[in-house]
Image: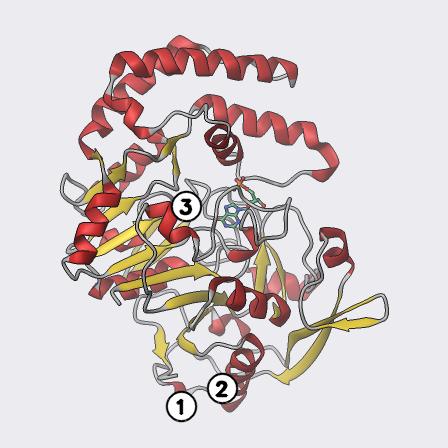
Amino acid sequence: MPIDIVIGAQWGDEGKGRIVDLLSANTAMVARFNGGDNAGHTVTIGTDTYKLHLIPSGIIHPHTQAFLGAGMVINPESLLKEMDMLRSAGVTVDLGRLHISHTAHLITPGLKALDAAQEAALKEGRIGTTGRGIGPAYTAKASRSGLRMEDMLDPWLLQDKLDAHIAQVNERLTALGAVELDADAVCTDFDRFAAELMPYITDTAAMISDGLEAGQRLLAEGAQGTLLDIDCGTYPFVTSSTCTAAGVFSGLGIGLQPVDQVIGIVKAFQTRVGGGPFPTELSGELADRLRGTGENPWDEFGTTTGRPRRVGWLDGVLLRYAVRANGLNALALTKLDILSGLPTLRLCTAYRLDGQVYARPPFGISRLADCKPVYEDLPGWQEDVQNIRKFRDLPEAARVYLRRIEEIGGAPIRWVSVGPEREQVIETGH
Ligand code: IMP
């Protein structure tokens, strides 16, 4: 079974990039199947930190083929910038290494402007989007009016489609009281984007299927997280794509087939950006302590937007839910080192709502918002764990914490990260 899937088990920002980096050392094909440049995947190698938004993190390994799948929505300007960033960091991003699905959808400045205007109009119930045009791009896709990568292969067709698209977007922007866009300027920019990206646009679904048939391994790299999934997440405070494991097959256009590891990435505590319920949310000094100051790339500030993340204790109810919704058969727990020095750690094992105790999230977003966490308190540890590489060398309290997460979540923790560097990972042997 040559497919591994990496999924965010929370609200995104779990540290998927580094686990993908680890696994892609033994993988021929790495692929993104959902989302767009709303994602921010950070990989630190020595003194170099790569912040990737669209290109699979596995591209950093020189032997990999990287794919941007059909389920993605791609801003060509961001993609070209990211390709340049990688090139200047010495990563080869040439033909034969990077492949873009011809059926992936395009994000235009019009869709970005609509995202901002729609959010502004929401006032109270704002989703807190990343402002990258993700929602409007998937809306256009579902309403069958979207532009696709393959449109960039025909310059005349592209200009016609862009003209019609910008005219349509401008009507909506005007209705929302926002500034209209200049269609000619957008067309000129896209002419250039098309010329630069054209050689990379291809039938990625066929290429990946052929690779799998030839016995090559595939690593599917999820963006965002289970609780932001359009169907399984905390709707409407979600992104607009399928972030769960099931999205891999439609998002890459490959047939349903057995998968080896479905790995859920779980942060040692919970974070969320944007609006929506968060039962274990913390505030005050402890929240500041977990979030960090923002001076380090691994502090809890958005990779894409720089926004401070909301933080809280690990929510076991939602972890159990993520294990079930994705069929996770392994977990990777990140940022264990951040908990060092806390006297007590809390794990949410159930919710209390209207006098009842729930082991599963109740349905209805307002009910989730009203849930009060039931906590189990565990002793913390004082030791710095950053230099530990063996599970048995971790402080007893850390091992107990990890074991309890496995029990509550219902899946084994196979990796634990204890620092931002590539080698700061413990293989647990579980
Ligand atoms: P959108 O994906 O920009 O439409 O944003 C919808 C919601 O998903 C907002 O709450 C965002 O903060 C959140 N979101 C989108 N992408 C990410 C991500 O990569 N990490 C964490 N949150 C995200």
Q: How far across and how far down the image is residue 131, in percent?
A: 53, 34
Answer whether residue 362 is visible to the viewer in this image.
Answer: yes
Please tell me which of labels 2 and 1 falls first in the chain. 1
Above or below, comparing residue 135 to residue 279 in the picture: above
Instruction: Tell me the amino acid under the disc marked 2.
Output: Arg
Q: Name the residue under label 3.
A: 34
Q: Distance between the residues labelled 2 and 1?
A: 8 Å
* Marks 1, 3: nearer the viewer: 3
Residue at (23, 50) in percent of width and height: 208
Q: Mark 2 points at which residue?
A: 399
* Left or right: 250 as drawn, with respect to 292: left
Above or below, comparing residue 29 to residue 148 in the picture: below
Answer whether residue 188 is visible to the viewer in this image.
Answer: no
Say whether mark 1 is within 8 Å of ligand 1: no
Residue farthest right in this picture: 355
Say whether mark 2 is within 8 Å of ligand 1: no
Which secondary structure, mark 1? helix
Q: Name the residue under label 1.
A: 392
Instruction: Tell me the amino acid under the disc marked 1.
Output: Arg
Label 2 neighbour load within 10 Å: few <14, some 14-19, many 20+ = some
Say whether mark 3 is within 8 Å of ligand 1: no
How many marks can you see? 3
Above or below, comparing residue 185 to residue 392 in the picture: above
Residue at (58, 46) in percent of width and height: 238
Please tell me which of labels 2 and 3 falls first in the chain. 3
Asked if the residue under mark 3 is in contact with the one under mark 2, i.e. CB atoms within 8 Å, the reply is no
* Left or right: 4 as drawn, with respect to 39: left
